[in-house]
Amino acid sequence: MHELTPDVESPAKHTERDHGGIAGHPRGLSMLFYAEMWERFSYYGMRAILLLFMIAPLAMGGMGMDQDFATQIYGNYTMTSYMVAILGGYVADNFIGARRAVLIGGLIITAGHYCLAFASVPTFYAGLILVALGTGLLKPSISTLVGGLYSHGDARRDAGFSLFYMGINLGAFAAPLVVGWLAQSSEDTHLTIWGAEITIHSFRHYLTTWGLDPTHSWHWGFGAAGIGMTFGMIVYLRHWHWLSHIGHPPEANSARPWGRLALIALGTAALLGVVIGADRIIMDLRESKGDEIARDFARLAYGMICFGLPVAGIIFFGVLRRDEDSRRIAAILVFYVCAILFWAVFEQAGSTLTLFADELTQNELLGFRFPSSWFQSVNSLFILILAPLFAWLWVSLRKHQPSIPMKFVCGLLFVALSFALLIPAAKLTAAGKVSPWWLIAVYFLQTIGELCLSPVGLSSMSKLSPARLTGLVMGIWFLGTALGNKLAGVAAAEFKSTDPAALARFFLEQALIVGGVTLLLLVLVPWVRRLTGEHKSPDQSSA
């Protein structure tokens, strides 16, 4: 197919005529599919081993960090990756364009992963900072490019985003398998298949054979994440011209909003400063006053940071004001609070559940031993299986499908059930390591919750946001994800694998908190539906 010339025809006409990609979609989707797949491979591969590397003893090649300090770093890193997306999206929209933002962000991420491949403290922190900044620049922009491939009336649009979402999960599925084997596998596996003895060597065995230090296997894992990101950038640059009609920066003669950029940057830095300051106080309290006082302060401090202002906003916009835009903002804030709580539990996959898998779970199925980080592939595998079923379900139900707040209720309910399931599993650890099926079941429940809440939440933000506030509302959604990731790290500090009773209480408390909010939201569903306008008939809604 001949390349179209965007300088002589509109982007809309370009996209309508472009059917040269996957399943008749625009060619640019194929390139963005693979670029995002490799970017997610790099992110989830690194995340799969990050906390384990930080707490591993120095003699085993780790950093020998205290678990409380390591979980703080983990939470701040994952929070920053999403929080900086607000700033990155603004820079892309108003200064450099989405196409260039993906390129620059990808190169920064690649450099960060290669920094982590070196065994030194300075390169470790430099790598985390670079990956977080690059992710913040790339993540919102690559989704913008996918949307730009289709005109508003293009029937391929929703299917295109579904294919793009599959790319994300293919990368997230493969990453822990590859990176986890490189970083963690230390024991050979001996299997008998049809009477034949088969030995599967660990990666550390190969390093020893090659005359290399096997304790540096962690950095081979980080390096693999960097290689994956390099593949993504090669694909992106090779087919850069496929996006020549979209993702451009504003006109050269247009004014640049430097003042607003400064405000967003200062606001992001201020929030990071508040969080890091709270972390410092918690550490000092733990050393001087003990764990109980430090834990109580953490709950109070992060409760105010994450939920204080949003709840006040819900009351102000949803109760004290009556105009339609105010009601929509109140509904957005309700979903924002629910999303923070959901991600606070769900994102413990890289912290609490990783520790549970590593220290308390039999990492063996059918005689095959595997690294504990492999459990982090389970969620993506379930997404690949269940996402088409959920898409079919919502379409089949049509007008009878649950409302937006009811889908949020379902999302919170399943994530609460997942931690409730861990209560008996925690008690069973008193007798030794538990079956891997416990964690597999947990990830199954969480995946159902994710499919009920995550795509619905993103869609509802775009539907409910007043036209003049669309960018701000999407930023709020990213901020909710960021704070949920931080809370996941804060919660992981309380994980104690040596006390089964305390561990059971740890999961029970979180299940009860999420369960209580789920019940509250269920009671408020009629009110929230009025806020969103879903209670109206189609004719009324358009009135």
Image (tube, rainbow, N blue to C red):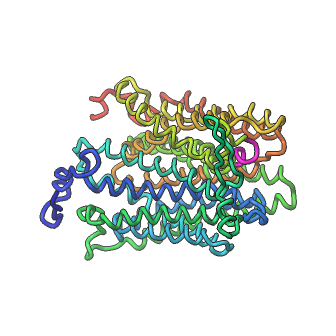
Taking depth in this image into account, of 217 and 411 the one nearest to the observer is 217
Magenta-colored span? 355-361
Which residue does the image show at 51% across and 63% down from the upper left?
84
Could you say where residue 35 lies in the image, as x and y percent from the top left? 40, 58
Quadrant occupied by the N terminus:
bottom left
Q: Is residue 481 above or below residue 46?
A: above
Which residue does the image show at 68% across and 66% down from the upper left?
216
224 sits to left or right of 516: left
Is residue 61 visible to the viewer in this orientation of the structure? yes
Assign the magenta stretch its main secondary structure. helix
Could you say where residue 424 lies in the image, as x and y percent from the top left? 75, 31
Which residue does the image show at 62% across and 46% down from the upper left?
349
Which residue does the image show at 61% across and 64% down from the upper left?
220
Residue at the farthest left position: 8
Question: Is residue 505 in the magenta section?
Answer: no
Please tell me in which quadrant of the rendered image residue 53 appears. bottom right
Taking depth in this image into account, of 71 and 536 the one nearest to the observer is 71
Please tell me in which quadrant of the rendered image residue 252 appears. bottom left
Residue at the farthest front position: 195
Is residue 439 visible to the viewer in this orientation of the structure? no
154 sits to left or right of 8: right
Please tell me in which quadrant of the rendered image residue 51 appears. bottom right
Q: Is residue 71 above or below residue 325?
A: below
151 sits to left or right of 443: left
Could you say where residue 332 lies in the image, as x and y percent from the top left? 47, 44
Could you say where residue 79 lies in the image, as x and y percent from the top left? 58, 57
Q: Is residue 503 above or below residue 116?
A: above
- Count every numbered label the image shows and give the total: 0
Quadrant occupied by the C terminus:
top left
